[in-house]
Image (cartoon, rainbow, N blue to C red):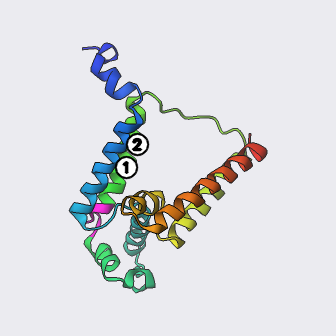
């Protein structure tokens, strides 16, 4: 059977979904995460746990770090990857994004334009990661879950992420494009 001519394949895997469908699915996933784990949906905190597990595997002792002194963080460190629903969610996000890109035939390995572009991407990633750690959240945990729970920090974050993206876009156009 040739999937390229299949109506359902085109409708669900090739064509973009309406934003409202995506919003409803994300809302249901957020509710599901809250119900199943007792925590708001977050992403970046668990990357720190992944790094700590790797550090433990090579003989380090991250359990003595201040970050892992909180009861829930210490439990996440002891439980391991398969016992941590939030870590499984992070893996699912990464795998799901790759799968969606592959199914939509949008995966491309692109030629690097310049090392300036690589340096800017690396610097931007480091700044975003650092910002996510010092703010105790990323756009999922701080914005999405914060706004959904009507917490003031989510709304404040929304304002500042808008201006940060606007300034970043201006800098990108001025210096890299």
The residue that appears at 78% across and 45% down in the rendered structure is: 174
In the rendered image, the vertical position of residue 19 relative to residue 72, given as above or below: above
Name the residue at the left extreme. Answer: 36
- Tell me whether circle 2 and circle 1 mark residues in contact (CB < 8 Å): yes
Task: Provide the secondary structure element on which disc 1 rests.
Answer: helix
Q: Which residues are magenta?
A: 80-86
Is residue 82 visible to us here? Answer: no
At which x and y percent is residue 65? 44, 84
In the image: residue 21, left or right of residue 142: left
Picture quarter with the N terminus: top left
Outermost residue toward the right? 174
Quarter-of-image position of residue 122: bottom right
Does residue 138 appear to the left or right of 2 in the view shown? right
Disc 1 residue crowd, few under 14, some 14–19, many 20+, Cα 10 Å: few
Spot occupied by residue 57 in the image (x, y as percentages of width and height): 37, 71
Image coordinates for residue 15, horizontal then vertical, percent: 40, 25
């Amino acid at each position: 059977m040739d999937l390229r001519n299949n109506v359902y394949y085109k409708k669900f895997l090739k064509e973009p979904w309406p934003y409202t469908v995506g919003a409803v699915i994300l809302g249901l996933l957020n509710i599901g995460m809250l119900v199943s784990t007792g925590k708001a949906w977050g992403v970046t905190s668990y990357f720190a746990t992944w790094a700590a597990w790797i550090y433990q595997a090579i003989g380090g002792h991250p359990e003595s770090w201040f970050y892992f002194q909180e009861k829930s963080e210490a439990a996440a460190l002891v439980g391991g990857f398969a016992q941590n629903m939030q870590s499984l969610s992070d893996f699912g996000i990464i795998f799901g994004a790759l799968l969606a890109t592959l199914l939509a035939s949008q995966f491309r390995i692109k030629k690097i334009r310049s090392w300036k572009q690589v340096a800017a991407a690396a610097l931007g990633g480091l700044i975003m990661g650092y910002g996510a750690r010092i703010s105790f959240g990323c756009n999922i945990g701080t914005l999405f879950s914060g706004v959904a729970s009507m917490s003031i920090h989510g709304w404040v974050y929304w304002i500042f992420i808008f201006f940060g993206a606007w300034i970043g876009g201006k800098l990108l156009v001025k210096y890299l494009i």
